[in-house]
Amino acid sequence: MATSKRDLIDDLLGAHSQLTRKEAKSIVDDVFASIAATLRNGDAVRIAAFGSFSIRDRKARKGRNLKTGEAITIPARKVVRFKPAKAFQAAATKPKRAKAKG
């Protein structure tokens, strides 16, 4: 199951009981807005032990309309790239331990 913004807010509330839901939502919104604003300015965002966000340019390329088979040109665009930190990658992909029978 995917984690939603609401799940992040609930986790924040669980870890910090003195926060109100409105304050927790504001914190989550502010973090996302700060990352987006930094990327819009052309700068990378690096969060230690988590990873880095950056903007990459994708070149225009040739593609095909799947309905008609017609060749088309897909325009160049900017995309967000996330590169996980080694520690985060290892923790996120660590296999779950099997429960002991007994």
Image: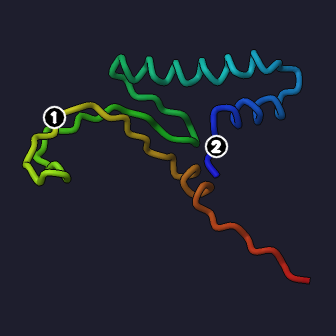
Amino acid, disc 1: Pro
SS class of the residue under badge 2? loop
Neighbours of disc 2 within 10 Å: few (<14), some (14-19), many (20+):
few
Is 60 situated left or right of 4 in this image?
A: left
* Residue 65: image location, x then y, percent: 16, 48
Q: Residue at x 60, y 55 (%)?
A: 92
Is residue 42 placed above or below 63 in the rendered structure?
A: above
- In the picture provided, is 42 more to the left or to the right than 90? left
Earlier residue among tags 2 and 1? 2
Which of the labelled discs sits on residue 18, or is there none? none
Relative horizontal placement of residue 13, taking residue 74 as reference (left or right): right
Question: In this picture, is 49 found above or below 46?
Answer: below
Amino acid at the residue labelled 2: Thr
| Residue 98 place in picture, x, y as percent | 75, 74
Residue depicted at 55% across the width and 24% down the height:
32
Q: Measured along the vertical axis of the image, is residue 73 above or below residue 93?
A: above
Relative to 99, residue 71 above or below: above
Residue at disc 1, secondary structure: loop
Residue receiving disc 1: 75
Q: Residue placed farthest to the front in the image?
A: 68
Q: Marks 2 and 1, how far apart in space?
A: 32 Å
Q: Image check: 38 left or right of 32?
A: left
Mark 2 highlights which residue? 3
- The x and y percentages for residue 88 are 58, 49
The image quarter in which residue 48 lies = top right
